Amino acid sequence: MKEHNGISATLMLTPAVFFLAVCSIYPFIWIFRYICYDYNGFRAVYTGTRNFSRMLSDATFWASVMHTFEYAFYKLIFILPLALVVAVLLNQRLRGSAFFRGVYFMPTVISTAISGMIFTFIFATGNGILNALLKNLGIIVKPIGWLTTQSVVMAAVTILAVWGGFGNYMLYFITGMTSIPEDVYESAKIDGASGVQTFFRITLPMLSPVLKVVLLLAITSAFKDYEAIMVLTNGGPGNRSMVMFLYIYKLIFGTQAGTQAQIGYGALLSLMAAVIVGSVTGIYLLVSKKLDDVV
Amino acid sequence: MMNVLTGKKTGVVYSATQRIIRVLLFILLLFFAAVTIFPVLYVVFGSFKENSELLIGGSNIFPSKWIIENYIEAWNQANFAVYTRNSVMLSLGVMFISLFNATMAGYVFSRKKFWGKEAIYMLFVAFMFINVGSVSLRPLYELAIKLKINKSLWAVVIFSAGGGQAMYIFLVRGFVSSIPRELDEAAKIDGCSFFQIYYRIIVPMLKPVMATIAILSFRQGWNEYILPMVFTMTNDKLRPLTVGVNMLKNAGDGTAAWNIMFAGATISVVPIILVFCFFSRFFMSGMTAGAVKG
């Protein structure tokens, strides 16, 4: 009986372990196999350290790293305060809170590929509805090339990212706030605290453990985003919205016109990208721990 | 606590200033809601416009003349019937595999003691955080070609389910751990084997978690984009909606076929929004359980 149960437990765990081995561990090991090779999908040629020296002098790659940081910064600086404010407002038991919460969360259930596409329509220069609305309101005279001008494309990318993601963070904050005891608010009210005071003196400090986790999630996920950007701008114009994982994708599958797949080089860059994301996460954890000790 | 969740009134009396502030806040929320919902309404209404109207543009969200032809054309000529079928099969496939896999694995992780369990579990956790991004699609793609499963949707289903499994397993494991072990013991005394306890005792109790996993994994399959795109680069017949619609955009005549793309985007977006409307609490509980607690 005992042995029999051991066998069934093994069998029940097999699919999960199989998936882990095939979908996670195998690709990870596979990367190391090709980092020193020039591999186009058919032939692999050993090139020693050439990939590495190419990476050091690859301006497009380092620009894409900078764009990733830029994107993450813009996304976080807009999405977190907005999500927090909305969460606080929904916590005031206004009429229709549940409805609003549902509406705000809705974009997160839509495929980023489709929402990226919808926004290419909205941002279109000539016949896009955003330019038409801005023109009607008298804000602009000439249509803005949201997706074709280097100076504004990051704004477009950020708008899409905030639209598509802020429902998630709102929900995290709402969940965090439900754990703040009601009587804390009651006593603050009795002491005559205003809404703004309550927010800064009670909600924010009591939310700080949640805030820390949410910030971690927000940072790591912002660095990983590339699907929506791929659909919206494909990294353009002139690589201005190229983030590192999008650049790597293009290398690995050779989707740039007239280029072959450069898998070995892409593998090396993706390791570098993983190191960058890992370092940012590590630094964040370190800083937030230090802050804990100080405060 | 329930008041916060449901937004029900608690009979508090507000002063006049407070009431004005609350009305203003309500209007602010309404404005946010309008902005949030606008892109979806725009594409849904736009899908009933004539292509000429879409290409001229303008700020009118409603069609000047309502037509249904875009859908007929998308369905018949642009292969959307096939894309939709593929999307449904992909989502259902990912959903069923995730349900079976996660409930079994989560149960074993919670209830069975065996050598190396902690190590295996740590691997699951670690690979949730190790992220090499798009590059991992290449080995999977080459593997599928070697195994000759790249000509069917199964490869996409398996790799999608495999890629997203960790979170679902954690959810089940947490829930099973909260079920009293006395239940297992009692069933064992009655002669139930390890597997019988799973499907007689545990699975019936897992229903809320299973609903969450079903919803989240269905959405995962429905929204999958880069994975199926890579696998169907040369095979139009296997494309799900997300890929099919975007292929139209990338095709040279992209500007000309706005009406088809609007219809396609609507076909892709509306079902998942409907699912969300009916099961929103599972979406939301899954989000927070997976992220904040996990």
Image (cartoon, grey):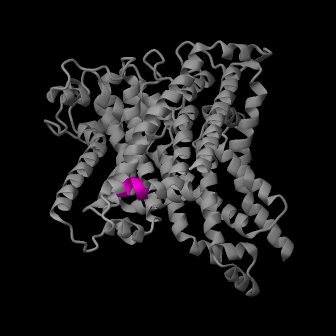
Q: Residue at x 76, y 35 (%)?
A: A29
Q: Quadrant of residue A119?
A: top left
Q: Is residue B256 visible?
A: yes
Residue B211 in the image: above or below residue A53: below
Q: Is residue A199 magenta?
A: yes
Q: Quadrant of residue B50?
A: top left
Residue B141, percent from left and from top: 65, 34
Q: Residue at x 63, y 37 (%)?
A: A283
Q: Is residue B79 visible?
A: no
Question: Position of B10 compared to B223: left or right?
Answer: left
Residue A101, percent from left and from top: 35, 56
- Give the tally of numbered discs: 0
Of B284 and A172, nearer the camera is A172
Residue A257 in the image: above or below residue A166: above
Q: Residue at x 44, y 68 (%)?
A: A181
Q: Residue furthest front?
A: A191
Question: Position of A54 compared to B3: left or right?
Answer: right
Magenta part of the chain: A198-203
Question: Position of B158 compared to A134: left or right?
Answer: right
Q: Is residue A217 magenta?
A: no
Q: Quadrant of the N terminus of chain A?
A: bottom right
Residue A147, percent from left and from top: 36, 22
Residue B130, percent from left and from top: 67, 41
Magenta highlight: main SS: helix
Of B76 and A20, nearer the camera is A20
Q: Quadrant of residue A66?
A: top right
